[in-house]
Image (cartoon, helix red, strand yellow):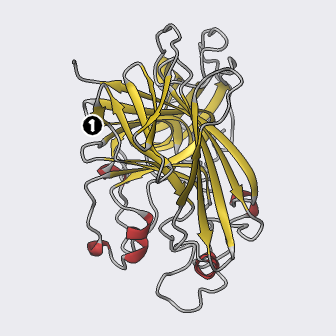
Amino acid sequence: ENRQHFVDTSWLNFHWSIKLHGEIQQSGVLRRAKIPAQGRQSFALPIPGFPPGGGPLFLHLMATAACDLPWCPRGHVVSHEQRLISPASNGKAPQSKPRKSVPSTTPLLASGSGKFTLSDRGLELHFSKSSGGLNQLTLNGQPVLQRGPHLQIWRGATDNDGIKGWTGQRNKPLGRWLAAGVPDAVPQLTSITVPKSADGIPAIRCRQAARCRGAQAEVVLIQDFVMPGDGTIRVDNEFLVPPALDDLPRLGIQWIFPRGFEAIRWFGRGPFENYSDRKAAALIDLHKSTVSGQYVPYILPQEHGNHTDTEWLEISNGKVAFLVRSKSPFQFSVSHFTAADLFAATHAHHLKPRRETFLNLDLFHRGLGTASCGPDTLPKYRILPGLHRWTYWIEVSRLDPL
């Protein structure tokens, strides 16, 4: 449909492609299709049939300038669109690449020296009985992790949440979060247990709680770490949000990796940052970037680099890859700054990147809204209280030869 009032579309080329897991299966170009002003025309694309259950199929459409114009060069992208042709229908969790069928093994659960250890195929998870959490992850004896996943409900407040340091912010989200004590709610690891498993698969259960003193309420996270015997780690999460905290900035967890985990790739919306209420321009595709490349230099430091509708993501240091996948879309961001770093800084030059990498996995991340000068985030893009469940899988693999 040509919504221009005076010219036809002969100044444009229309590119189309069919993508499966971000890889082009077929593509073509409609060169200088002459659709009259305010007119419409149908085109048949030679799209082949695809076997069911192979994964999500997307049709990508892009209009580019067919020649140099006073305001743009030839090839300039004027518009783009994406349509889901066929979703994944096999009910399996999406993967970065087909996994080889591997025989099932029996993971080991050991206890002693103040810790529990889960191990399978050279992958070991070490849990501290005193602190109650995952404090080490190794692959063939080599450490991969700096700190295990901990509950995270705070974000570096955005300008739309409320302008930090200004007066008159009490009725904005930032003012409500400060009054409730959300920024100061540090998660505490309260217990570690070995739950009984009906199928005999060993698991470790960790409980965390973040207390918001102003609201006299706490958010609870219960994590079950399970090794199914196929070389993966399954993490079952239960988030319990009390009624007193009915509008949190985010609901998720954070993994911390040592220096060097810089390369990322993911299948989800990108390549630029996007949020639940601001994502239409970000296409679902296979994207690659770096942790440093995700930084957005807002003059007043704030949350940045979020990505929605993610099916899987991988972070690596060139030697080891840490991949997260889920059956349900999730949100993520990676950074060399914590939410506290961003909130404490009042100008971009105050920020100093940390050496470690922070991977934020969010089941929910509050929308942005326009409350800096307009309406707040719509209710459907906020985080509701109640019990929220989420399961994701982890694969850790070597990228360099032994």
The x and y percentages for residue 324 are 49, 34
Residue occupied by mark 1? 317
Q: Is residue 264 above or below residue 150?
A: above
Does residue 289 appear left or right of residue 324 in this picture?
left
Give whichever of 46, 124 is nearer the camera: 124
Name the residue rendered at 72%, 24% in the picture: 198
Q: Is residue 227 above or below residue 261?
A: above
Does residue 131 appear left or right of residue 39 in this picture?
left
Q: Say whether residue 338 is visible.
A: yes
**Number of callouts:** 1
Name the residue rendered at 50%, 53% in the picture: 150
Q: Is residue 132 above or below residue 138?
A: below
Give whichever of 342, 393 is nearer the camera: 393
Give whichever of 300, 115 is nearer the camera: 115
The x and y percentages for residue 180 are 64, 78
Q: Quadrant of the N terminus?
A: top right
Q: Residue furthest front?
A: 113
Name the residue rendered at 31%, 72% in the picture: 348
Q: Residue furthest bottom?
A: 167
Q: Quadrant of the C terminus?
A: top left
Does residue 115 appear left or right of residue 351 in this picture?
right
The x and y percentages for residue 11 are 47, 38
Name the residue rendered at 59%, 91% in the picture: 168
Give whichever of 137, 26 is nearer the camera: 137
The x and y percentages for residue 118 are 47, 30
The residue carrying pointer 1 sits among few (fewer than 14), some (14 to 19) or many (20 or more) residues within 10 Å by Cα, namely: some
Q: Quadrant of residue 246?
A: bottom right
Q: Amino acid at mark 1?
A: Asn
